[in-house]
Image: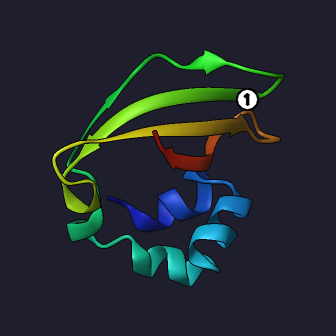
Amino acid sequence: TEAARVCDSGITPALLKRRYGNRAGCIGGRKPSTLAQKAVIAPAKLGAAGTATVMATASGGDYGKGEKLTLTVVRDGTGTWRVDTVKKS
């Protein structure tokens, strides 16, 4: 629920730009009523160097009673994993 932390280090700059336009749009778009209240996350599947795929089922907020999602995460230059894409499965 910490919008600034998610916008600054939880997602890639590319996802921030695609989804929200800029940091202010990201922070403004992360209203508590829109966020998932629960997520069940499957073990990550490692891909090419520095990438992984994560399957999740999110519910609450914009995700209703359960949306299946596929997240692509990438390792940034500091070794931190960041979400790069989110797709409904």
Q: Nearer the viewer, residue 75 or 68?
A: 68
Quarter-wise, where is residue 53 in the image? top right
| Residue shown at the point (64%, 37%) measured from the top left | 73
Indicate left or right for 62 with 51 as reference: left
User: Left of 84 or right of it: where is 25?
Assistant: left
Closest to the observer, 67 or 42: 67
**Mark 1 neighbour density, 10 Å: few (under 14) some (14–19) many (20 or more):** some
Q: Position of residue 50 (x, y in %)?
A: 78, 28
Seen as rendered, the residue at the extreme front is 89
Query: In this view of the protein, which residue sits in the foreground, 63 or 80?
Result: 63
* Residue 16 place in picture, x, y as percent: 63, 66
In the picture, measured across the screen, residue 70 lies left or right of residue 18, that is: left
* Quarter placement of the N terminus: bottom left
**Residue 86: image location, x then y, percent:** 54, 48
Would you place residue 69 above or below residue 33 in this image? above
The percent position of residue 23, horizontal first and vertical second, equals: 59, 77
* Tally of numbered tags: 1
The residue that mark 1 highlights is 51
Q: Residue at x 54, y 39 (%)?
A: 71
**Type of amino acid at the residue the image marks with label 1:** Thr
Q: Quadrant of the C terminus?
A: top left
Give the image quarter of residue 14: bottom right
Q: Could you say whether the residue bearing mark 1 is in a helix, strand or loop? A: strand
Instruction: Indicate whether 1 appears above or below 26.
Output: above
Colouring? rainbow
Tell me the residue at 46%/29% (across/down). 55
* 42 up-or-down from 81: above or below: above
Q: Residue at x 42, y 81 (%)?
A: 28
Residue 88 shown left or right of residue 60 in the figure: right
